[in-house]
Amino acid sequence: MAKTYYLLGKNARNQVYLRSNKKRGRRIADSKLLTKKILSKYNLPHPKLYAVFETIEDLNNFQWEKLPGNFVIKPSRGLGGDGILVIKKKGKWAGEWYLMGDEKIDISQIRQHILDIFAGRFSLHNLPDKAFVEERIKIHPIFKKYTYRGTPDIRIIIFNKVPIMAMLRLPTPESRGKANLHQGAIGVGIDLATGITTYGFYNGRRIKFIPGTKKKINGLKLPFWEETLILAVKVQEVVPQLGFLGVDVILDKEKGPMILELNARPGLDIQNANLAPLRGRLTRIEGLKVEGAEKGVKIAQDLFAERFADKVLAKKGAKIVDVLEEVKIKAANQKTVSVLAKIDTGALRSSIDKRLAEELGLLTPENTIFTRYYQSALGRKKERKVIGLTFYLKGRRIKTSASVTRRIHLKTPFLVGLRDLMGFLVRPEPVESAQFRRI
């Protein structure tokens, strides 16, 4: 686990990051019906809405036989998954259905449940609420051995149009089929770059297997991962009044990722599921100018990727590098060019000379991840671009983001920072090396 002072606590979340959530944004997130209205307006995929109940008259006049065999009833302003009825299939007789736990339910019981929703039994602050019926999602087959009855979902924290962290929430018998950690669901960390599951968190402790099974938590590759992240960021683009939010996504067997709901006050257990702190990640992308969902996803995957390759490398024995090393940088035309690089553990990010980046065709708008603005020693406002870059060091392929700087006056046109040296051992004394081509 990273140092504790990088962890995001409730006080910091409320006082620093939730301030970016405006009143209108909170109002949208707190109402599932209003969320659906916005998603429909911008053609963002979400479960189909079958019916809305605002009054007792709506309830009395509704023709239940028109509904499909399975559906979901929800309160619009429900909290923590309470008040949700998941109908599995029709019963033998008209007006009867089966819930996910194979309990039988009839129209009179459903009516009473909706009346409870009207009374505000499940809503924020117990205020009167509306009820609605939506389609029940067909669970993706990849989850069938991992989940208990209910539908798993993916919580993604979005800030400044960048996915910061994600976790998979798996229903359990204890959670009664609901994907809610506080009711006993399992939280599973996800590597943002690959969509592969990493660590498990269940009832306040770390786990490696699904309880009661020999099924490993880690190593599950989620389908539609790139589309899922892009979809989550697009939500913030259409609801810009939510600067810091949680987006809950479900994966339908046929339709792919769909938005389930928004959360204007996302919980912090996601840090336990990922064994990573939110605050450190949030700090890294504050103030960035992010243009578009795809760019935001690229930033996240470059900055917050897990180092699976490093773990494999460490088992085989780390490679030793000197202060000066030859690296091969992949140009825009896919050819590699050898240059002399400085290995510097004192610099966090790798950096490349501006002229070299231009000659390799890497300094293009499409390859620019983001631009940082800073003041020079003379007080002048300057910009520094960060670009996507792939290079080879000691035979190992490293895909990273590199700052573009002026290194023409330095010995090497390329610097390898600490972030790209995981799995290497650095020998501090330089050794004689061959002459490398400088551009």
Image (tube, helix red, strand yellow):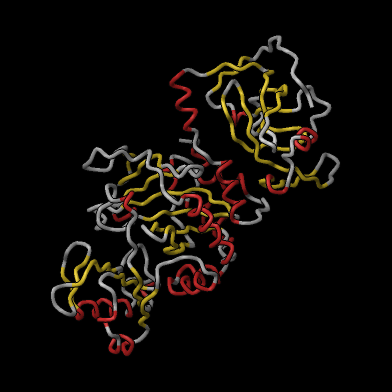
Residue situated in front as seen by the camera: 161 or 83: 161
Q: Which residue does the image show at 49% across and 72% down from the upper left?
A: 40
Q: Is residue 352 above or below residue 297?
A: above
Residue 173, position in %: x, y? Answer: 22, 53
Extreme top residue here? 432
Task: Tell me the quarter of the picture where residue 304 sits.
Answer: top right
**Residue 11 in view in this figure:** no
**Residue 343 in view in this figure:** yes
Q: Is residue 61 above or below residue 358?
A: below
Q: Which residue does the image show at 47% across and 60% down from the upper left?
A: 265
Q: Which residue does the image show at 43% across and 42% down from the upper left?
A: 196
Residue situated in front as seen by the camera: 384 or 133: 133
Q: Quadrant of the C terminus?
A: top right
Task: Tell me the quarter of the picture where residue 90 sits.
Answer: bottom left
Q: Quadrant of the N terminus?
A: top left
Q: Which residue does the image show at 47% across and 40% down from the upper left?
A: 276
Residue 51, position in %: x, y? Answer: 36, 79
Extreme left residue here? 92
Q: Is residue 296 above or below residue 306?
A: below
Q: Is residue 176 above or below residue 438?
A: below
Residue 88, position in %: x, y? Answer: 24, 66
* Numbered marks: total: 0
Residue 210, position in %: x, y? Answer: 27, 43
Question: In the rendered view, does 142 fall on the left or right side of 330?
Answer: left
Task: Tell me the quarter of the picture where residue 71 sits.
Answer: bottom left
Question: In the rendered view, does 359 fall on the left or right side of 96?
Answer: right
